[in-house]
Amino acid sequence: MGSASGPQTEDPHARAAAHKLGEEIAKRGHILINGACPGLPHDALLGAEEAGGLTIGVSPAFSEYEHVNEYLSPHDNDIILYTGQGFMERDIINIRSSDGIIIVGGGIGNAQ
């Protein structure tokens, strides 16, 4: 599971680190689960996909339409679970679904 927001999502070093992290997770045969959101979690997703890994996104949205059009989030995870319960519940599902949590460039969402 990964999370990040704010100005660090534009930092090329943080973006490269997130991408590399996704690659390494996939190369080791693990599944990358994230919040199906833009920024560093998406960079990690791209790294995992390039390495042939499985990615699961947990969205706060009720549907793909809401996910893309209201949350302005990408929809290129292999699997997306639409919770329809907002960010807090999405984060709880992410945490409970993960064997480990890695935070890159943590923002306000990590403080919850």
Image (spheres, rainbow, N blue to C red):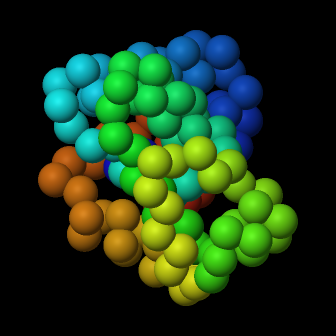
Tell me where residue 86 appears, x and y as whole percent.
Answer: 59, 80
Q: 80 above or below 7?
A: below
- Between 50 and 101, the residue placed more toward the observer is 50
Residue 101 seen anywhere in this rendered image of the structure: yes
One can see residue 71 in this view: no
Quarter location, residue 71? bottom right
Q: Is residue 49 above or below residue 36?
A: above
User: Percent from the top left, x then y, of residue 17?
Assistant: 47, 19
For residue 65, above or below residue 102: below
Q: Tell me which corner region of the image, top left, top right, bottom left or bottom right, holds residue 30.
A: top left
Q: How far across and down, in percent of the image, does residue 14 sit? A: 56, 22
Please name the residue shown 65% across and 39% down the image. 39
The residue under the point 67% across, 69% down is 64
In percent of the image, x 75 and y 74: which residue is there? 66
Taking depth in this image into account, of 20 and 51 the one nearest to the observer is 51
As drawn, 75 above or below 63: above
Query: Seen in the image, is 52 located left or right of residue 34?
Result: left
Coordinates of residue 53 in the picture (x, y in percent):
33, 32
Q: Residue at x 73, y 27 (%)?
A: 10
Q: Is residue 52 left or right of residue 85?
A: left
Number of numbered labels in the structure image = 0
Q: Nearer the viewer, residue 71 or 111?
A: 71
Direction right: furthest residue: 69
